[in-house]
Image (cartoon, rainbow, N blue to C red):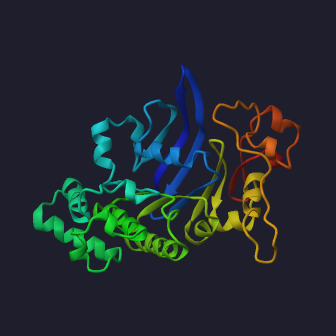
Amino acid sequence: MNILEIKNLNLSFLSGGIAYQALYNINLSLEKGKMLALVGESGCGKTITAMSILRLLAQNAQIMSGKIIFNGINLLNLPEKEMQRIRGKSIALVPQDPMTSLNPLYTIGSQLIEVIEIHQNLKGDDAKKVAIEVLEQVKIPNAKERLKAYPHEFSGGMRQRVIIAMAIACKSQLIIADEPTTALDVTVQAQIMDLLKEIQKELRTSFIFISHDFGLVYEAADSVAVMYAGHVVEKSEATELFKNPKHPYTKALLKTLPDFNSTKLEAIAGQPPSIKDYFLGCPFEKRCSQKIDICVKEAPYNIIVNNASVNCWIYK
């Protein structure tokens, strides 16, 4: 059963009276209790897709068409007050840098308890008890004492655990983790990913995991959507994508990964297009080593190849 379905989502940003399209016909689905990874270069549309789910977009952003269906309800049709009840409770965000999400002027305990009081309708000692329990659940030692600490007294990894604790305290059904390990060292990255997988397994929480790190995606994700210039160019089960990548962009991304048997690192020639660039055909054609004549003239459509969805003319 799908907890989330994004259907034909198109989004633009208005600037100087001109609409620049940032997302093109995004179609994604996520099963309950599973993890979907969004991967691709910076600026490809991963975070904007996630923020569209939460409806936390810049004032000049405009959703032109599409549906975002969460538990059978189209979030795009809900009034803002209803979305406020969903954010933080049913759908939670684990950001890239937790320091920007935690108020440095208030203790960890006061911020965590406030979230619990708002979304769980608990007060006083009952809310404090839940706060201690979830801090213990995310493996923060001396949880009762650490409630009194301020964000700057926690390491980056511990602050990230606090944000995750807020999500599970509210029993969020979907957690959007936007590059949650980027600012952490390798050891702490592994600990945070183990924690997310443990939560997924024990609480049957669904995840959207945004990352540049294919190693983390390989270890954690159930399915993967590869994004390029606001398009989903390939999506499949994670094992299939790593074993048999199909889109030329996916292949090129995987070739950039370090190989212990080689001292050479490969790079993708050229640069991703700007949001202001216009392309009639495939957005990747200028950087693609496998392009054919039609790639320049006409945008590819979705083709199913071995249970994977690929937007590429070479599979026509």
Which residue lies at the image location 43% right of the left edge and 74% below the top edge?
198
Which residue lies at the image location 82% right of the left edge and 38% below the top edge?
295
In the picture as drawn, the residue positioned furthest to the top comes out as: 17
Can residue 266 be seen at all in this image of the molecule? Answer: yes
**Which picture quadrant has residue 139?**
bottom left
In the rendered image, the vertical position of residue 296 relative to residue 140, given as above or below: above
Q: Is residue 89 left or right of residue 128?
A: right
Which residue lies at the image location 52% right of the left edge and 77% below the top edge?
187
Q: Position of residue 201 (x, y in %)?
A: 44, 73
Which residue lies at the image location 74% right of the left edge and 52% below the top edge?
249
Q: Nearer the viewer, residue 233 or 186?
A: 186
Q: Nearer the viewer, residue 102 or 124?
A: 102
**Which picture quadrant has residue 12?**
top right
Q: Nearer the viewer, residue 97 or 127?
A: 97
In the rendered image, the vertical position of residue 75 relative to residue 206, given as above or below: above
Q: Position of residue 314 (x, y in %)?
A: 83, 47
In the rendered image, the vertical position of residue 247 relative to residue 187, given as above or below: above
